[in-house]
Image: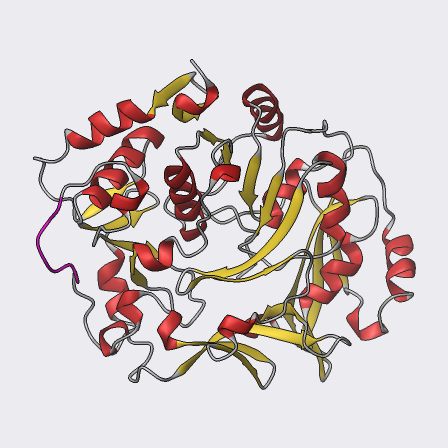
C-alpha cells in the first residue's frame, strides 16, 4: 500500500489505519449517543470520535485524560455559565475537506489561560482551521504528530492532515530514539511541535532527517539558539515559528524569533504598554460574547499576557515572556526568557529553566535548572563567568541546579515551578 493511503500510523504497536477505514469507523458512530465529552485514552479511537463529531456537526468537550468536565471549573472564572452552544440540525458529512468545512461542530478545548484564568473554550472549525493550507504541494506531506491530540496545536495538525488526506505518524509521548526511528522509517516530511520537543530531539548525536521539509515551532517562546539545532537535524526543512493561542488560534508567522503584524491583521492585533493584544473578533466562538467571560463588547481588544520587545527594525518585535513570569530581583525587573536564551546558547546546554524563589534579602532569588547534553560538563564558576560577559550581575542566577530532566506539562511544554 502506498504511503498516502494511510491515515494513522502508530510505531509503538504497528497499528495502521487507512482513510477508508476512518470513514467507515466514524460512520458507525452516527447512531451512537451524542458525546458530551471525548476523552483521550487511545489514539485511533479518539481520532475516530473526533472525526465523527465534526462529520455530525456535534458539540464535544475534548479531555486530555479521564477527569471531571472543565465546564464547572471554567464557570467559576467567568461572568456567566458556559453552556453547550451547539444549535441547528445535524448534517452527516463525508471526509471530503470542502464538505467538512461546512460542519457546524463545536469543540471544547482546554486552555492554559492565555487570555485569563484556565477555562473551557468552544471553537468552530473556522478558528481551528485558520492555519490549514491545501493544494498540490501539500498532498504529499507525511505528518509527524508531536502534539497532544486534544491540545489546540494538535487539532491543527489533525485538520491539516485531514484537509490533504495526509498520513499522521504518532510521535507524541515517545522517547527520542523511537521518534527518530519513526521519522526515518515513515519518511515523515512535516513536523509541528514545541521548542521543548525539538530540544529533546535535536541533540548533538541525533541522526539527520533529509525527508523533513516543513518544521513548525509553536506553543512556547522561540529562541534563535534552537535554529542551528533544527537546521543540523533537518537540513532540507523550512523552519517557521508560529504565534498562536488556544483562545484565538494561529495569528503570526516568522522564520525566526522576530514577528511582524501582517497587513491583513493590522486592525486586529496591537501592542499596548509592552503587551500583545488581540481583537475580540479573533477569539473562539464562546469568548466573543458575555457567556465566555472575556469581553462584553465585540469591538474590544483582549490582552494575551505575552510581553514583547520592539527590535531595531521598528516594526518587528519578539516575545520575551508571559506577564506573570517577570521577576523583581532586588528592585530590577528580570525576564527569565532572556537568561534562558543566554544559558541555552552554551554548547554544553541541552535545556534550561529559569525561575524565582522568595528570598528575604532580595525579595526573589533567581534560580536555574540546567540539563546538559550527554557527556558534557559545565562547572558553575565557568557558567557564571561566561554569563557575566553577556548579562549584568543582577541577572546571574544565585542558585544553579544541574538536573537529569526538566518536567513537562501534559501538552509537552516545559513546566514552570509553582
In the picture, measured across the screen, residue 182 lies left or right of residue 390, that is left
**Image location (x, y in percent) of residue 53:** 21, 44
Q: Choose between 360 and 162: the one closer to the eye.
A: 162
Residue 375, placed above or below residue 253: above
> What residue is shown at x 49% (from left), y 37% (from top)?
136
Q: Choose between 332 and 314: the one closer to the eye.
A: 314
Please say whether residue 221 is visible from this viewpoint: yes
Q: Is residue 89 magenta?
A: yes
In the picture, measured across the screen, residue 215 lies left or right of residue 160, that is right
**Image location (x, y in percent) of residue 294:** 33, 76
Residue 194, placed above or below residue 418: above
Query: Image quadrant for the N terminus?
Result: top left
Residue at the farthest front position: 136
- Give the main secondary structure, helix, strand or loop, of the magenta stretch: loop
Colour approach in the figure: secondary structure
Please say whether residue 171 is visible from this viewpoint: no
> What residue is shown at x 44% (from left), y 24% (from top)?
4
Task: Locate residue 361: give its quadrant.
Answer: bottom right
Residue 255, placed above or below residue 297: above
Residue at the farthest top position: 1
In the picture, measured across the screen, residue 125 lies left or right of residue 325, that is left
> What residue is shown at x 71% (from left), y 58% (from top)?
368
**Image location (x, y in percent) of residue 194:** 57, 48
In the picture, measured across the screen, residue 64 lies left or right of residue 147, that is left
Q: Choose between 405 and 200: the one closer to the eye.
A: 200
Residue 129, placed above or below residue 4: below
* Tag count: 0
Q: Is residue 342 magenta?
A: no
Task: Locate residue 208: give its quadrant.
Answer: top right
**Image location (x, y in percent) of residue 408:** 54, 47
The stretch in magenta equals 85-91
Amino acid at each position: 500500500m502506498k504511503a498516502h493511503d494511510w491515515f494513522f500510523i502508530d510505531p509503538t504497536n504497528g497499528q495502521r489505519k487507512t482513510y477508508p477505514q476512518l470513514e467507515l469507523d466514524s460512520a458507525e458512530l452516527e447512531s451512537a449517543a451524542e458525546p458530551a465529552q471525548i476523552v483521550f485514552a487511545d489514539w485511533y479511537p479518539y481520532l475516530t470520535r473526533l472525526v465523527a463529531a465534526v462529520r455530525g456537526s456535534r458539540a464535544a468537550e475534548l479531555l486530555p485524560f479521564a477527569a471531571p468536565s472543565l465546564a464547572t471549573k471554567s464557570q467559576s472564572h467567568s461572568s456567566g455559565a458556559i453552556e453547550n452552544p451547539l444549535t441547528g440540525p445535524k448534517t452527516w458529512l463525508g471526509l471530503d475537506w470542502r464538505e467538512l468545512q461546512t460542519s457546524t461542530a463545536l469543540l471544547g478545548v482546554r486552555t492554559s489561560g492565555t487570555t485569563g484564568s484556565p477555562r473551557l473554550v468552544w471553537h468552530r472549525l473556522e478558528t481551528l482551521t485558520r492555519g490549514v493550507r491545501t493544494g498540490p504541494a501539500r498532498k504529499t506531506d507525511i505528518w509527524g504528530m508531536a502534539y497532544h491530540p486534544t491540545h489546540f496545536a494538535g487539532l491543527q495538525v489533525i485538520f491539516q492532515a485531514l484537509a490533504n488526506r495526509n498520513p499522521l505518524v504518532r510521535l507524541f509521548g515517545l522517547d527520542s530514539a523511537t521518534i527518530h526511528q519513526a521519522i526515518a522509517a515513515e519518511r515523515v516530511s512535516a513536523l509541528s511541535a514545541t521548542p521543548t520537543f525539538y530540544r529533546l530531539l535535536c541533540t548533538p548525536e541525533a541522526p539527520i532527517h533529509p525527508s523533513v521539509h516543513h518544521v513548525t515551532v509553536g506553543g512556547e517562546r522561540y529562541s534563535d539558539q534552537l535554529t542551528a539545532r533544527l537546521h543540523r537535524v533537518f537540513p532540507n526543512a523550512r523552519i517557521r515559528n508560529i504565534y498562536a493561542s488556544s483562545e484565538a488560534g494561529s495569528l503570526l508567522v516568522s522564520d525566526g524569533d522576530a514577528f511582524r503584524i501582517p497587513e491583513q491583521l493590522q486592525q486586529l492585533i496591537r501592542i499596548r504598554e509592552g503587551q500583545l493584544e488581540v481583537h475580540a473578533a479573533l477569539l473562539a466562538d464562546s469568548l466573543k460574547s458575555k457567556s465566555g467571560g472575556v469581553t462584553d463588547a465585540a469591538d474590544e481588544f483582549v490582552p494575551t499576557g505575552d510581553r514583547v520587545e520592539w527590535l531595531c527594525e521598528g516594526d518587528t518585535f519578539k516575545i520575551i515572556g508571559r506577564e506573570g513570569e517577570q521577576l523583581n530581583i532586588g528592585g530590577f525587573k528580570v525576564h527569565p526568557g532572556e537568561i534562558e536564551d543566554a544559558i541555552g546558547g552554551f554548547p554544553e546546554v541541552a535545556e534550561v529553566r529559569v525561575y524565582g524563589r522568595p528570598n528575604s534579602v532580595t525579595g526573589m532569588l533567581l534560580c536555574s535548572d540546567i540539563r546538559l547534553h550527554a557527556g558534557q560538563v559545565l562547572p558553575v564558576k565557568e557558567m557564571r563567568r561566561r554569563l557575566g560577559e553577556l548579562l549584568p550581575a543582577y541577572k546571574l542566577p544565585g542558585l544553579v541546579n544541574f538536573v537529569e530532566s526538566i518536567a513537562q506539562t501534559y501538552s509537552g511544554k516545559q513546566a514552570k515551578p509553582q
